[in-house]
Structure formats: C-alpha cells, structure tokens
Amino acid sequence: MPARVFLTSGGGDSIDTAAKLARRYWHEQGQPERTVLLSRTQGYHGTHGIGTAIGGIEANRVGFGPHVEAEQVPFDSVDALELAIERLGAERVAAFFVEPVLGAGGVHPPLPGYIEGVAEACRRNEVLLVVDAVICGFGRLGTWFGIERWDVVPDMIVFAKGVTSGYLPLGGVIVSERVAEPFWSSPGGPVFRHGATYAGHATCAAAALANIELLERDDLLARGQAMEQPLLDALLPLAGHAATAEVRGGTGTLAAVDLDRELLERDPAALGRLTAAARADGVLVRQLGSGVAVSPPLTATAEHFEMIAHAISAGLDAAAAGVS
C-alpha cells in the first residue's frame, strides 16, 4: 500500500493532524499509553493547540496553561533525545517532531549526523518520526520536502506554505504505509475521526497543482540547494561587523544574522533599529529572537543576495550606532 496524504488548511492543522494520528496509530496497535510527544528546543510547529504544546520557543507557550503531554529536548543533541526516551520510557513516547532546518527558532541547520542520528534513535525505540517540512519544503532546501537531503525515511511529513507558494491556504500530512495501514487494511476498520472544515478545499488544491506545475516546469526546486552557498557567501562578510554575533546558513536558501548579545542586553532596541534600517534600504527581514532572518524566493540571484547583505549591513550600522 502506498503512502497516503491527509489534506488540511495549513501548517497548524497539519501538525495537530500528525500528532493525533500518531497517538491513534499506537492506540490501534494496542499501545494506548504511547501519548508523549517529543520535539526540539527552538522548534516551531505553529500556534494551534498541539503545535503550541510541542513548540520549542518558550515565549510562544507562556500564559496558556497546561497542554498535552509534550517535552522538548536540546535541538542539537541526539544523546538528549535518547536520554529523554529512556527516562520517559519508550513505551510512553508516541512521536518525535523535527524540522530539517530550524526555521522560526533562528535558522539553525542540523549538525552533521544529527538527522540520521535521531532517525536511528526513533527506529530503535519504535518512536514515530514526524518531519515538519512546512518551512523547509517545496524547494527551500532544494528538494520537495527537504528531508530527502538525508538518508532518512520518516513516518510522516507535514507540509503547507510552499505547496501553493503561499497564495492560498493549504497543507497536509504525508502518511507512511506503516501508519496508514490500520485505517485502510479492511472495510469497516477504525476511522480516523478528524478533519478541518476547509481541509483540502478545491480552490486551494487547484492552486497547489498549478504551483507544482510551475516548480517542475522551471526547475525551481534545485535552486534551493544551488543558491544556498551564494546566499551564505554574500552574508558571511557581515560576521566581521562589530554588531554581529553570528551568521548562519548553508543548508537551503535561508540564513540568519544574530546581533551581538552584549549589545542587545545593553540596548534592547538595537534589533528594531536593524530591522527598520534594512527595510529603509529596500529589504524586508524577519526578526527572530536575537537576530534577523531571510528566505529569498527561489528565483533570486547573486545580485539579490548582495542587496540583502547591503541592507543588513546598513541595519547593523544603525544597531551599533544607537540611532534610527
């Protein structure tokens, strides 16, 4: 039986769908005690109920009270995942959620061997591996879902955003044969009673098909990987700026520039000045924690990357100078 696709209205819907499906799968396997959902610090999985619970950005969880059984492990440590599973008991853990590259949490590419390591830990402990490809999919990392860049086959893939290039709301979960099997194995079998009102809306699905056709026609997927180094090369000189703490990127066409921590502690308004000055120079950047991030379109060229670097440089000057 091939993989199945459960369509939704967007990324938040898709995360809730994957989490509920993971728990329901284990229920059908006679292991209803597998309810704990593991994820990573700095991870972002939307703002729906379960997405809030498993999100690793603390500010997004504060003030909403208790959530579902969820726990975050350090985003860069396979050992931390192993220890969490051991401490909780593998028989209680339903799934582990991972972004191939942490997006909203600061653009953190995985360390060498990390993706393969957590996949092996999940396999060994029979924990479902859920890849959140909402940000990393549809060419951002140079492949359909980003995860193909590693020798890993997840149990579920969550997607949204890029499937329509953001023009209309659509998302979904690609469900492996293993997880789908209990719900498709026989007529009258268990029913996954879940679905949003506008999930898989016909107009949104038509936009997705048209978008996918364009991605294939213009060979845009490959550009996500082909242009990752030119983007990073354009931004790396900013690492020498007195207001810069770190430049990150190199896995897909997305990158981040962090402000110096002492500068931020001394002058919290510095990040706002950076953002405003970059905008005044013609480039929109996104504030993320202690820095700014960019994810230019797949049609962007080296010339555009130089424009981005120039604008962020102007922003760093403004941040360091203490003026708007």
Image (cartoon, rainbow, N blue to C red):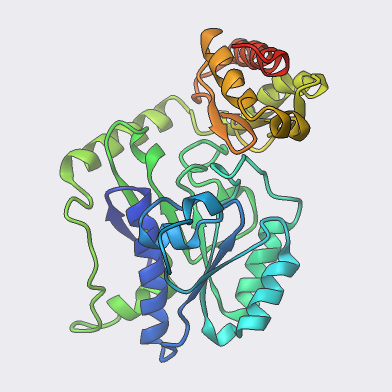
Residues 53 and 172: in front is: 53
In the displayed structure image, the side of residue 235 where residue 136 appears, left or right: left
Q: Quadrant of the N terminus?
A: bottom left
Image quarter (top left, top right, bottom left or bottom right) of the C terminus? top right
Depth order, front residue of 144/280: 280
Going by the image, does 268 lie left or right of 282? right
Q: Residue at x 53, y 36 (%)?
A: 140
Camera-side residue: 131 or 179?
131
The residue lying at 55 percent from left, 54 percent from top is: 58
Q: Is residue 163 above or below residue 178?
A: above
In the image, residue 14 lies at what x, y percent?
A: 36, 56
Determine the image quadrant of residue 318. top right
Residue at 41% of width from left, 67% of height from top? 19
Looking at the picture, how far across and down is residue 245, in whole percent? 77, 31
Image position, residue 310 (x, y; %): 66, 10
Relative to 77, say whether 251 is above or below: above
Vertically, is 148 above or below 89? above
User: At x 41% / y 87%, what residue is drawn?
Assistant: 32
Relative image position of residue 177 (x, y in whole percent): 41, 70
Residue 102 left/right relative to 191: right
Judged left or right of residue 75, residue 15 is: left
